[in-house]
Amino acid sequence: MTSTSNNAIVTFEHVNKVYGNGTIALSDFNLEVNEGDFVSFLGPSGCGKSTALRMVAGLGEATRGEVKVFGQSPKQLIKESNDIAFVFQEANLLPWRRVIDNVILPLELRGMSKRQSKEEAIRVLEMVGLKDYASAYPRELSGGMKMRVSIARALAAKPKLLLMDEPFAALDEMTRQNLQLELLQIWEKANTTILFVTHNVFEAAFLSSKIAVMSARPGRLSATIDVDLPYPRTLEMRTDRQFANLVKFASEKLERSSEQKELV
Ligand SMILES: Nc1ncnc2c1ncn2[C@@H]1O[C@H](COP(=O)(O)OP(=O)(O)OP(=O)(O)O)[C@@H](O)[C@H]1O
């Protein structure tokens, strides 16, 4: 039995995931995420990062072992509460609805009154710097702005846990860097815990308080790195020696975990 710390809000205990076609996506995967953490899953393509994240959202169950969120099964939790929100690589906005109506939609579906859901939508659009675009249609927005709407929509229900699966992968480098900074500001303001999937070492190092390095498939946790760069993080930090050392350290862990797989 694995002992969990008091404020662990997500736990993976000896999790195995075998898909119907026999693909072993995760093997004896163990991890604890504490309240307020910004944890990145960092690993090579196909190592099971999305599989692990989706399980936290109740999308797919462990073949063996257990995933718990706030001490409960994610499937149960997602039915009963708004504590978990998911942001995908694509913004997935409804093109025929204005920005504000895209953000309002999940609130309305949960039965919130029109007036209150509008207030909430404006609050989160302000948080992501898009209040002035509330009446615009998605086609009038850039890729980065669409992603900010998607983040706002996820934050509208004040989730305690925000799950993000490579949300910036499709964006150009400048937009990606700006959104990384904005996301950190939002994380602080929204007082939430973030689980973030990436295969980009720089992104993981810049954003995270903790990096979970995964081995090549079947994904195992090969290392956890506590990132001791202070918050708030700034773009200038990316040129610091401390940041360079961290990226080097994480890259080496990543390489080593891939080599270990090849030796198996
Ligand atoms: N529904 C599914 N059925 C069968 N195999 C699947 C399914 N979903 C994922 N896989 C396989 O499981 C493994 C892990 O996939 P997953 O998407 O979790 O990896 P990932 O680390 O997120 O990859 P990437 O970085 O490329 O997005 C891969 O080999 C993938 O092909």
Image (cartoon, rainbow, N blue to C red):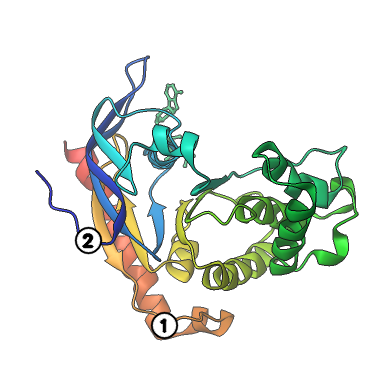
Q: Callout 1 environment at 10 Å: few (<14), some (14 to 19), or many (20+)?
A: few
Name the residue beneath numbered marker 1: 230
Q: Amino acid at mark 1?
A: Pro
Asked whether 45 or 84 is in front, the reply is 84
| Nearer-N-terminus badge (1/2) | 2
Please provide percent x and percent y for residue 204: 44, 62
Label 1 to label 2: alpha-carbon separation:
24 Å
Residue 240 versus residue 255 in the image, above or below:
below
Query: Ligand 1 sits in which quadrant?
Result: top left
- Residue 168 seen from this side: no
Q: Residue at x 88, y 46 (%)?
A: 139
The N terminus sits in image quarter: top left
Q: Residue at x 55, y 81 (%)?
A: 234
Name the residue beneath numbered marker 2: 6
Q: Amino acid at mark 2?
A: Asn
Which element carries disc 1, helix, strand or loop? loop
Q: Callout 2 environment at 10 Å: few (<14), some (14 to 19), or many (20+)?
A: few
Asked whether 196 or 66 is in front, the reply is 66
Residue 191 versus residue 263 in the image, above or below:
below
Q: Residue 236 vs residue 25: left or right?
A: right
Which element carries disc 2, helix, strand or loop? loop
Please provide percent x and percent y for residue 85: 54, 47
> Ligand 1: does it lie within 8 Å of the C-beta at label 1?
no
Asked whether 127 or 20 is in front, the reply is 127
Q: Are marks 1 and 2 in contact (CB under 8 Å)?
A: no
The C terminus sits in image quarter: top left
Please provide percent x and percent y for residue 228: 34, 78
- Residue 255 seen from this side: yes
